[in-house]
């Protein structure tokens, strides 16, 4: 059959069917996809981190509509260093030190969850932080293989990527004005 015969509209219904036939069809239900990945490395501050592209954080930050936020200063000299915290320094010491972790340099897969905000515990200068939740069965298995909880801080924290923060007092009245 020639395409002209297929395209010849016989009725409104046949044109609709043709459009349906020519369009892409999706699966019945989407499934979680773990096609994002990053390298596992030891930071200079003693944390075991999963590398994340800074552009991912910058893109999420650019799309946010919150007053007084800034990119999270986390790397050397306060520069952006996008990452997922996998092992805290005290957890590394508990397992015998960072040299015990043989998976450093290996790539681990993850997927992104939603954007959340919270008041950070232990980060006194910040009033609020925003983070993308991260799901990774591979990182959970890695932690369990060293006798740790599946998630950081005895399971109290989720894996996440911090994308924005707001310093204390930024939104309060002060003597600063536009120049």
Image (tube, grey):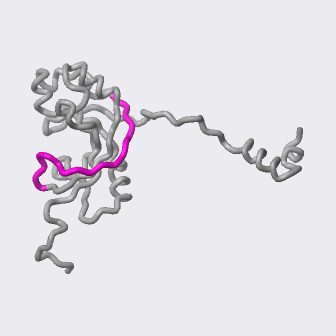
Residue 74 place in picture, x, y as percent: 20, 48
Q: Which residues are magenta?
A: 107-125
Q: Is residue 134 above or below residue 77?
A: above
- The front one of 108 and 22 is 22
Relative placement, left or right, of 131 versus 26 is: left
Look at 33% across and 38% down and name the residue there.
134
The image quarter in which residue 17 lies: top right
Q: Residue reaching furthest bottom? A: 179
Where's the C terminus, which quadrant? bottom left
Q: Which residue does the image show at 24% across and 19% down from the upper left?
A: 145
Q: Main secondary structure of the magenta part?
A: strand
The residue sitting at 34% across, 31% down in the picture is 136
Picture layout, residue 36 above or below residue 166: above
Asked whether, in this view, residue 78 is left or right of residue 82, the answer is: left
Residue 84 position by quadrant: top left
Q: Nearer the viewer, residue 111 or 51?
A: 111
Q: Across the whole image, how many numbered discs are drawn on residues?
A: 0
Residue 114, position in %: x, y?
36, 45
Please give left or right for residue 149 compared with residue 27 in the image.
left
Residue 106 percent across, percent down from the top left: 31, 27
From the viewer's perspective, is residue 37 above or below residue 175?
above
Residue 158 painted magenta: no
Q: Quadrant of residue 111?
A: top left
Where, quadrant-wise, is the N terminus in this rendering? top right
Q: Residue at x 21, y 59 (%)?
A: 166
Residue 168 is situated, as x and y percent measured from the top left of the image, at 14, 60
Is 117 one of the magenta-colored residues?
Answer: yes
Q: Is residue 149 above or below residue 6?
A: above
């Amino acid at each position: 059959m020639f395409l002209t015969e297929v395209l010849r509209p016989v009725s409104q219904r046949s044109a609709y069917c043709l459009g349906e036939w020519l369009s892409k069809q999706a699966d019945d239900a989407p499934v979680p996809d773990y096609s994002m990945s990053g390298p596992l490395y030891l930071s200079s501050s003693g944390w075991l981190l999963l590398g994340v592209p800074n552009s991912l954080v910058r893109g999420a930050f650019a799309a946010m509509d919150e007053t007084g936020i800034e990119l999270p200063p986390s790397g050397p000299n306060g520069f952006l260093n996008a990452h997922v915290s996998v092992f805290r320094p005290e957890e590394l010491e508990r397992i015998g030190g960072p040299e015990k972790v043989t998976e450093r340099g290996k790539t681990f897969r993850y997927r992104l969850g939603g954007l959340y905000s919270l008041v950070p515990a232990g980060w006194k200068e910040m009033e609020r932080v925003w983070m993308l939740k991260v799901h990774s069965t591979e990182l959970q298995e890695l932690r369990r293989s060293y006798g740790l909880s599946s998630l950081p801080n005895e399971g109290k924290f989720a894996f996440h990527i911090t994308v924005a923060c707001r310093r204390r007092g930024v939104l309060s009245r002060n003597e600063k004005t536009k120049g």
